[in-house]
Image (spheres, rainbow, N blue to C red):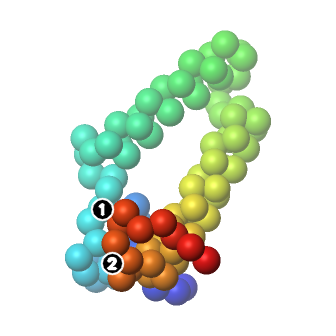
């Protein structure tokens, strides 16, 4: 696993205290923005499954959620890499390649 993945997993609170990257906060602590948004997503998924008459998870709903999570992870990885690339630029300076 590379350093970017370690940071990503630390942000998600998926690593033990010993494994996590020092100085990287867990964005999923109870009551946090991510925690609250995830709870809203789960509730919406439950309501959709109720409307569909599905007692467990609906495979299409799960496919949508998992695809969005993979997109989000890819965006995070690229944001990190661009952050490193442009770390010394003024935030108001246009990013020119």
- Determine whether 76 is above or below 50 in the image: below
Q: Nearer the viewer, residue 69 or 45?
A: 69
Q: Is residue 71 left or right of residue 79?
A: right
Can you give x and y, in whole percent of width and height, for residue 34 in the image?
37, 46
- Determine whether 67 is above or below 17 in the image: above
Q: Quadrant of the C terminus?
A: bottom right
Is any part of residue 77 visible from this angle? no
Q: Nearer the viewer, residue 4 or 83?
A: 83
Can you give x and y, in whole percent of width and height, for residue 53 in the image?
71, 15
The first of marks 2 and 1 along the sequence is: 2
Is any part of residue 57 visible from this angle? yes
Q: Are marks 2 and 1 in contact (CB under 8 Å)?
A: yes
Q: Which mark is residue 20?
A: 2
Can you give x and y, in whole percent of width and height, for residue 78 in the image?
56, 70
Label 2 to label 1: alpha-carbon separation: 9 Å
Determine the residue positioned at 27% across, 52% down. 29
Determine the residue positioned at 52% across, 86% down. 2
Q: Is residue 96 left or right of residue 92?
A: right
Mark 2 is surrounded, within 10 Å at the Cα level, by few (under 14), some (14 to 19) or many (20 or more) other residues, namely: some
**Mark 2 element type:** loop
- Determine whether 95 is above or below 30 in the image: below
Determine the residue positioned at 72% across, 17% down. 52
Q: According to the image, label 1 marks what residue?
A: 26
Mark 1 is surrounded, within 10 Å at the Cα level, by few (under 14), some (14 to 19) or many (20 or more) other residues, namely: some
**Mark 1 element type:** loop
Q: Quadrant of the N terminus?
A: bottom right
């Amino acid at each position: 696993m590379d350093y970017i993945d370690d940071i990503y997993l630390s942000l998600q609170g998926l690593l033990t205290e010993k494994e996590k990257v020092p100085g990287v906060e867990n964005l999923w602590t109870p009551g946090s923005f991510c925690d609250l948004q995830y709870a809203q997503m789960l509730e919406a998924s439950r309501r959709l499954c109720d409307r569909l008459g599905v007692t467990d998870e609906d495979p299409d709903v799960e496919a949508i959620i998992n695809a969005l999570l993979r997109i989000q992870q890819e965006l995070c990885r690229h944001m990190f890499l661009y952050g490193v690339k442009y770390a010394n630029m003024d935030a108001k300076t246009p990013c020119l390649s």
